[in-house]
Image (cartoon, grey):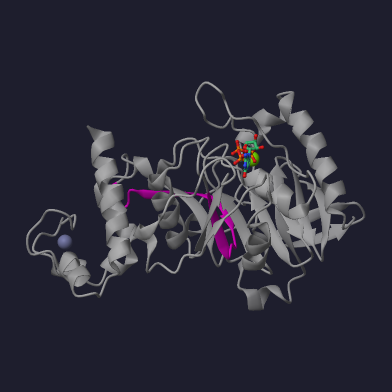
Amino acid sequence: MNNDSSTHTSRWKERRAIRSHGLSKQANAKNSNPVSEAEWPDWLPVYSDEEAKSKGEIGILADINYPFYSLLYKGSFIEGKAERGVQSDILKLLVVGDMVIFESSGEAISIKGVLQRHSKIARLYTDSTKRQGERSVEKVIAANIDIGVIVASTTQPQFNLRLIDRYMVICEYGNVKPLLCITKIDLEKSPGLPMYDGSNMPIVEVSNKTKEGIEKLKELLKGKACVFLGSSGVGKSSLINTMFGKEILEVGEISRKSGMGMHTTSSASLHLFKGDTVLIDTPGIRSLSLGNIDENSLKTYFHEFEEYAPQCEFSDCTHSHEPKCAVKEAVENGKIPKWRYDTYIRILDDIRREKK
Ligand SMILES: Nc1nc2c(ncn2[C@@H]2O[C@H](COP(=O)(O)OP(=O)(O)OP(=O)(O)O)[C@@H](O)[C@H]2O)c(=O)[nH]1
Ligand SMILES: [Mg+2]
Ligand SMILES: [Zn+2]
């Protein structure tokens, strides 16, 4: 046990080395589809915050490289290995950020249960093999997050408003507050973002080269559990390195040919910053799978519509071109924020275009 995050990192680097030899990469894939907590099996003990206090020590899952994992416990990182059987079955259901009850005997630790998630970041997609109304499926990436730092670069890779829209939906869905961080302002000026006026989403413009804006970012994230989200190459790992003031995460090149990132980070990892702030790095999502959502599922992620949708003339109203739409009316009357409705329409148009 130690509380030096750089030692934790060097171990993490060792694991990456193992991973790159292929052996554990394969094992890791087995853990690639943790189910939503709605599908957690009966045999997994799940506790409320209150119940958990009397059940044992509580640690936060900091990284998973199946069957290895580490827990953040009282400011230190503890390494664990899930033995075959129940331990391994439990680990496969969990993600970085999950709070677990654990017991230790000698060197070995075992996970006894998990705390209910109060928020999450999940990829959303539609499972067309399921029945209408039950097709929205989620794949959880990280749990118990306060702030989703949506990272977008001004250039290399190209600035992409559509992705920001989608990450905002993901944050909203998982009860996570979004914060927009525009990187690489040393290379190109940040674009104006009037479409998010009224959203209350903080926007920070930074450069990992000149360090401009980094102090402001630190202030906004202080004391919170934060996850960095965004395409490969936008500078998620770089931001964590800049905040720490040293290289704790591997940073990748941008492909000269495509101007895109090279998917340098391959799994989520949690880092403790200044004792009170949790920073979680994630791999750039290849194609943000909101694109795999059908029109009917998309609207279910906009909770503001729920109250009005039953009054639409058509029961399958998509709240776009249909007459007598109660949702559109609510937008006009200021009952649903216009910027949210506009985001919905942009994504809906995208889905329709992708289908063609
Ligand atoms: N000029 C400039 N380059 C940056 C900035 N931030 C990151 N980079 C560069 O962008 C490249 C990609 O950065 P990473 O931090 O690896 O990006 P990532 O988002 O973690 O990418 P994945 O791990 O692949 O998802 C590296 O070459 C960084 O040096 C910035 O603010 N300005
Ligand atoms: Mg990275
Ligand atoms: Zn409608």
The residue closer to the viewer here, 332 or 193, is 193
- Magenta stretch, main secondary structure, is strand
Q: Quadrant of the N terminus?
A: bottom right
Residue 107 in the figure: left or right of residue 340: right
Where residue 299 appears, as percent x and y from the top left, is 28, 57
Residue at screen point 47% across, 59% down: 171
| Residue at the outermost right position | 106
Where residue 190 appears, as percent x and y from the top left, is 49, 49
Residue at screen point 42% across, 41% down: 289
Q: Quadrant of the C terminus?
A: top left
Where residue 126 appears, as percent x and y from the top left, is 35, 44
Q: Which residues are magenta?
A: 131-151
Does residue 248 show up? yes
Tell me if residue 48 comes above or below residue 120 in the rendering.
below
| Residue at the outermost top position | 257
The residue closer to the viewer here, 52 or 313, is 313
Residue 238 in the figure: left or right of residue 343: right
Residue 306 in the figure: left or right of residue 203: left
Residue at screen point 40% across, 50% down: 166
The residue closer to the viewer here, 89 or 258, is 258
Q: Is residue 42 magenta?
A: no
Where residue 140 appears, as percent x and y from the top left, is 52, 51
Does residue 36 show up? no
Q: Is residue 136 magenta?
A: yes
Residue at screen point 51% across, 36% down: 157
Residue 310 in the figure: left or right of residue 341: left
**Total number of numbered discs in the rendering:** 0
Q: Quadrant of ligand 2?
A: top right
